[in-house]
Image: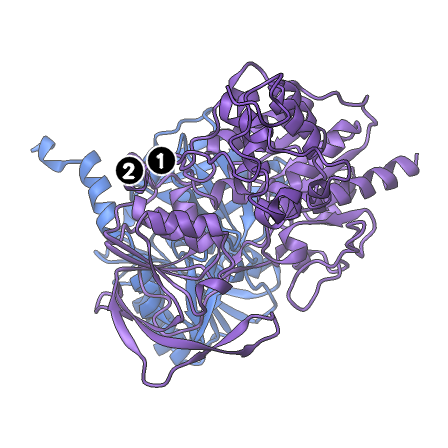
Amino acid sequence: MNDILKKETLAPGVIRLRVAAPRIADRRQPGQFIILRAAGDGERIPLTIADGSAAEGWIDIIFQVVGAGTRLLAELREGDALQDLVGPLGKPARIERFGRCLCIGGGVGVAPIFPIVRALKEAGNEVTTIIGARTADRLILVKELEALSDDFHVATEDGSLGRRGFASDAFLDLAAAGRKFDYAVVIGPAMMMKVVSAMTLERGIPTCVSLNPIMIDGTGLCGGCRLEINGETKFGCVDGPEFDAAGIDWDSFLRRLNSYRAFERRTQGHEQCRLKDV
Amino acid sequence: MPTEGRLKEDGPAPAGRFTRVAMRERDPRVRARDFDEVPCGYTDDEARREAGRCLNCRNAACVRGCPVEVKIPEFIGQIARGEFAAAARTIKETNALPAICGRVCPQEDQCEKTCVLGKKGQPVAIGDLERFAADWERRNGTPEVPAVKPPRGKKVAIVGSGPAGLTVAAELIKEGFDTVILEALHEAGGVLVYGIPEFRLPKEIVRREIEGLEAMGVRLVTNFVVGRTQTIDGLFEKDNCAAVFIGSGAGLPSFMGIPGENAIGVYSANEYLTRSNLMRAYRDDASTPIIRGRRVVTVGGGNVAMDAARTALRLGAAESTILYRRSEAEMPARKAEVRHAKEEGIRFELLCAPTEILEDSDGFVMGIRCQRMELGEPDASGRRRPVPIKGSEFTAGCDVVIIAIGNQPNPLIAATTPDIQTSKWGTIVVKPEDGRTSKKRVYAGGDIVTGAATVILAMGAGKIAARSIVEDLVGEG
C-alpha cells in the first residue's frame, strides 16, 4: 500500500511523487489534500493533491524539502512505500462557471493551482494563469499549465524566464492593460497570498486562497490549524483549506506559521551543518 | 496468622472488612517528572486480601452499576481463591478491555458506588481488582483468545477505534461477522491513544488489547476517514458492508472565544495531548514539536484538564495551574485524578475564569487575564452558576495556555450523510435502548451520541448497538 510508483525532481529541492492510492484517487477533488508520514515515528505532513487518476489508482504530490520531515520524505525511492497516507481531506475547491478566471501560483504553490486550473477549464471558464518563482529552474509544471490555460504568463525574480519580477507584477501588467476577471485563485507562500489577494480584491475580483496552517490530524481534532476568518475561528483542515481571501486575518495566520521556528532551527542545525562543506 | 474473615481456610485474611487494601502509588516528586504509570498495581497477596473483603452478595448491586455488567462477585471470588487466570476470563466474557477499564473507569460512580460495604466503610476496590486480573493475565503467558462463531459472510464496518468501536468489534467478531474497524489516525485506540496520557494508561496496554481483538480476527484499517476516504453510503454500496457502526467520538475541541485565544502557545487540550501522546513529543527524539512552557495554565475542571496540567509538569513546567470557574465540589474530574494532581504540585485557581490571553509582539503567550467568580443560583446542569465578581480582575504571567473546556461531536459524518438524524448539538440521534440511528443498518454509540462522556459509557453503548446489529443481520438470514 502507498507504494511510490514514480519519483522526479521538478526543480532544485522540489520533488514529485506518484503514489499508489486507489481510494484517494477515486474520491479526490481539486483543492483537497492528504496527510502522510514518510517513515517511522515521523511527523504528519499535509500536502495538496496535485493530480491523480481514478482509473489507474494513483495520486501525485509535489513538495519542497524544507524541514526534517520533508527531508525524510525526499529520501524515499521508487518502490518504497509511505508509512502512512490518509485522505482526501478538506473541502474541495470552489469550481463553478465564473467566466474569466485568474489563477496565480507562486513557488511550490504552483502544484495545488494545477488541478484547480484544469477543473475551472473543464467547468467552461476562460482561464488566465500566472506562475512565478525566483529563477527559471525553480518553475514547475510550466508546460502542463501552458497547455491548459487560455492565457499564460510567467514571472521570475531574476528575469531568467518571462517577466522579471513577482507574479504580482505580471498581474499588475494585465490589470494595467485593462483585463477584467470574474474570479481569482491565489496559491503560494503565505506572504505572497496576502499581498497578491489584496491586489485582486482591491480591483473587485472575488478571490480565494488555499491556506496551509500547521495541523496534526486534519480531521478537526486538534484545532491547531485555527484561523481567524471574519472575526470567527475556523479550522483550516475541515473548513478549508480554501477560503475567501477577503475575510482572512493574515497577521494572525502568518504569526501562527512561526509557532515552532525555534524547534525547526534546532532540528535543521542538527542535520545540515553547512560548516562541514567549507 | 489472623483468623477473622471468611478466607481463613484458603487464603490470607482481609486487612479489615471496611478498610481497603490501598494500592501503592509512586512518589509524587518522582512521578511528576516522568511518564511512567502512577499506581503500582496490587501484588498477588494484596489482591487476594482485597478480594477477600467482598461479601459475595446474592443480589449483587455492583453488577447493576456496571454499564457492561461484568460478573463482579464471580471474578473477585476467583481472585480471592488465587484463580487469577480464571478471573481474567470471567471479566472478558462481558468486557473486552479490562486492563483499560481497570484504569480509567469512574468506578466510584458505578460498581463501587453500589457496593454494600460502602454503606459502612470503603467499597471493595473493584476497579483495582479488575486491573490486577487483566495485568496478571498479560504478564503471565498468552491471554486466551475467546472462541468465535463460524463466519457468516457478512461485513460490518466500525467507524472509529476508540472504546465504543473496540467493544462493538469484540462482540461482532465473536458472532462470526467480518469485522472491520476504520480509524482516521495512523494508530488505533482513539482517545485511549491520543488523549489519555501514558502515566494514566500506558499505550502498551492499549496496543495489547487491540492485538487481542486482531487475534480473534478483527481487521483494522488505519488512515481511513469515513466521510472523506469513503462515505457511509459508499461503505454499503461499494465496500459491501451489511451494517455500519459509528463511534467517531467527540473530537472537535471547544474554545472560549476570548481575545488572544489564537496566540502562539494556546493549545486545545486535544492538540496538546495529541502532540505529547500520539506524536510522542514527550520524548527527546520526537519529530513533533511542542511548546514546553515554564508556566502553564490549563482552563477546565475535568479529567482532560487534569491530564493536560499533569502532562505540562512532566514536560518540564516549573509551574502548572488549573483554572476552573466553579469550586472543587463542582469539578467533573474524578476525585483520584484531582488528588494525584494536587500531590504532584498542580496549583488550583478555583472560582476563576479567564477573560483574555495576553500576547507579546511576536504573538507568543505572555500572560492571562482572569476574573474571580462566586457561585450563584443553580443553572440548567443543576450546578451553581459562576457569577463574576466586579473589580476582581487580575493578570498572571504564563507562556502556555491549554483550553480543556470540552469537545463537540465531529460533524464530518453527519455532514456527508444527510439522512442520519442529528440533534441541535450535532450528536447523532439513536434510540438509547438499541443504538439504531434514523438510517437503516446504521448504528451509533459513545461520545458521538452522548457528547463527551466516559470510556465505559461508550463501551456500554457499544454493547447495546452490537446486540441490535446481531439481531438485525442474523434475523434477515
Give the amino acid type for the residue marked by disc 2 in the picture: Val
Label 2 – label 1 distance at C-alpha: 7 Å
Nearer the observer, A70 or B151? B151
- x 75%, y 20%: residue: B147
Taking the image as drawn, is residue A143 in sight?
Answer: no
Decide: marks 2, 1 in contact (CB < 8 A)?
Answer: yes
Q: Residues within 10 Å of mark 2 (few under 14, many from 20)?
A: few
Q: Chain A appears in which tint?
A: blue
Q: Is residue B447 left or right of residue B357?
A: right
Q: Residues within 10 Å of mark 1 (few under 14, many from 20)?
A: few
Taking the image as drawn, is residue B168 in sight?
Answer: yes
**In the rendered image, residues at marks 2 and 1 fall on the same chain:** yes
Label drawn at residue B30: 2
Specify the quadrant that holds the C terminus of chain B: top right
Q: List x then y, in percent, for residue B282.
A: 33, 40
Q: Is residue B16 left or right of residue B306?
A: right
Residue beneath label 1, please? Answer: B26
- x 55%, y 31%: residue: B50
- As drawn, which residue projects farthest toward the left? A278
Nearer the observer, A140 or A45? A45
Q: Chain B appears in which tint?
A: purple
Q: List x then y, in percent, for residue A243.
A: 48, 66
Q: List x then y, in percent, for residue B185.
A: 52, 42
Label drawn at residue B466: none
**Helix, strand or loop under label 1:** loop
